Image: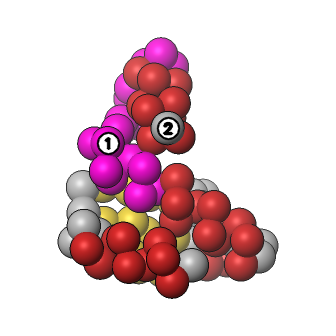
Amino acid sequence: MNGLLKIANEENIKIDFYPMKKLKVVSIPHSIAINPKKVQSNRELKEIVAHEIGHQKRNAFYNINSTYETKARQEERAAR
């Protein structure tokens, strides 16, 4: 996890823990918000942070109104 936090810091990505009603995580440019109540383990937290850093580094964002195709394409891009 320390390595991921170092990458986030070097890339000027702020990671916050924020309770949300429905969402587990939200990622916008330079910020990741994680709902601590929906994360079940440290392993899951590490996977979330790694994936969201992928969104940040590849500028792979979408919004709630994006088409399924756009969401899938951006998720695939973030996972690379």
Q: Which residue is mark 1?
A: 58
Q: Gap in Å between the C-alphas at discs 2 and 1?
A: 9 Å
Q: How many marks?
A: 2
Residue at left offset 51%, top offset 30%: 76
Q: Amino acid at mark 1?
A: Arg
> Foreground: 34 or 51?
51
x%, y% of residue 43?
Answer: 73, 71
Q: Is residue 71 shown to the viewer in this render?
A: no
Contact between marks 2 and 1 (CB within 8 A): the answer is yes
Q: Which residue is mark 2?
A: 80
Residue 54 colored in magenta in the image = yes
Q: Looking at the rendering, which quadrant does residue 62 occupy? A: top left
Q: Quadrant of the N terminus?
A: bottom right
Is 47 on the left or on the right of 41, as rendered?
left
What stretch of residues is rendered in magenta?
A: 52-69
Q: How is the image coloured?
A: secondary structure
> Foreground: 7 or 66?
7
> Foreground: 21 or 6?
6
x%, y% of residue 65?
Answer: 38, 29
Residue 40 colored in magenta in the image = no
> Foreground: 11 or 68?
11
Mark 2 lies on a secondary structure that is loop
x%, y% of residue 74?
Answer: 42, 31
Q: Amino acid at mark 2?
A: Arg
Mark 1 lies on a secondary structure that is loop
